[in-house]
Image: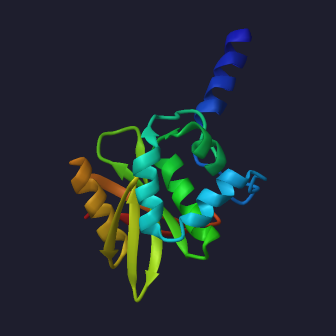
Amino acid sequence: MKRILLIIMVCLLLSGCGTCNLNVFVTPNDNEFIAVIDSLDTPEKIGDYMVENFIYKAHILNAPDPYTLWQTKKGDCNDMATFGTWVANYHRYTTYQIQIFFKDLQFTHYVAIYDEGNSKYSITNNQYYNFLFYNFEDIVDYSSDLAQIEWTKYKVFDYDNNMIEKGYNK
């Protein structure tokens, strides 16, 4: 019986999506954090800041909120995508996140997307900023080419975690 309960608990822990729910994140009362966030008023500045200040470290069972990532300076692709979308949303950008599924792999990849207007998007892929994308599938193709892994499908989520688009590789 104890084994069954332990297995159920482990399965529940591993079944989470691994993303931070930004709808419940409250901006902390930390003047240094707020000053940094205020200075990151464009997607390019957000990407530059992440390259200079964050290092990649996988978080398999949890996804830190933007403040925790800022404090620890360590995160994976979904942590950085969450940070980027939150900061850009703070500055009134329309933001999205793409979850990319790869062929023959158990893990997925997250990319932050920023609506730059005039039907153009920019992204931060992990920390790295890039721009001039015209649709979500182009972003998925670009990310897949960088990883040199074929993608099978993707899901696009708005800031409120509503899935707004799903695509499959032809």
- Image coordinates of residue 65 in percent, x first then y, are 64, 47
Q: How many marks?
A: 0
Q: Is residue 71 above or below residue 142?
A: above
- Image coordinates of residue 33 in percent, x first then y, are 66, 52
- Image coordinates of residue 144 in percent, x first then y, are 27, 55
The residue drawn where x is 68% and y is 58% is 34
The answer to whether residue 140 is visible is yes
The residue drawn where x is 60% and y is 73% is 91
Location of residue 71 by image quarter = top right
Q: Is residue 42 left or right of residue 33?
A: left
Q: Is residue 59 above or below residue 140?
A: above
Q: Is residue 103 left or right of residue 92?
A: left
Looking at the picture, tell me which residue is in the foreground, 169 or 72: 72
Q: Residue furthest bottom?
A: 118
Coloring scheme of the render? rainbow
Q: Is residue 80 left or right of residue 159?
A: left
Location of residue 159 by image quarter = bottom right
The residue drawn where x is 48% and y is 61% is 46
Location of residue 94 by image quarter = bottom right
Q: Is residue 129 left or right of residue 170?
A: right
Looking at the picture, tell me which residue is in the foreground, 122 or 149: 122
- Image coordinates of residue 110 in percent, x first then y, are 44, 53
Of the 4 image quadrants, the one containing the C terminus is bottom left
The answer to whether residue 16 is visible is no
Q: Is residue 73 above or below residue 162?
A: above
Looking at the picture, tell me which residue is in the foreground, 5 or 137: 137
Of the 4 image quadrants, the one containing the N terminus is top right
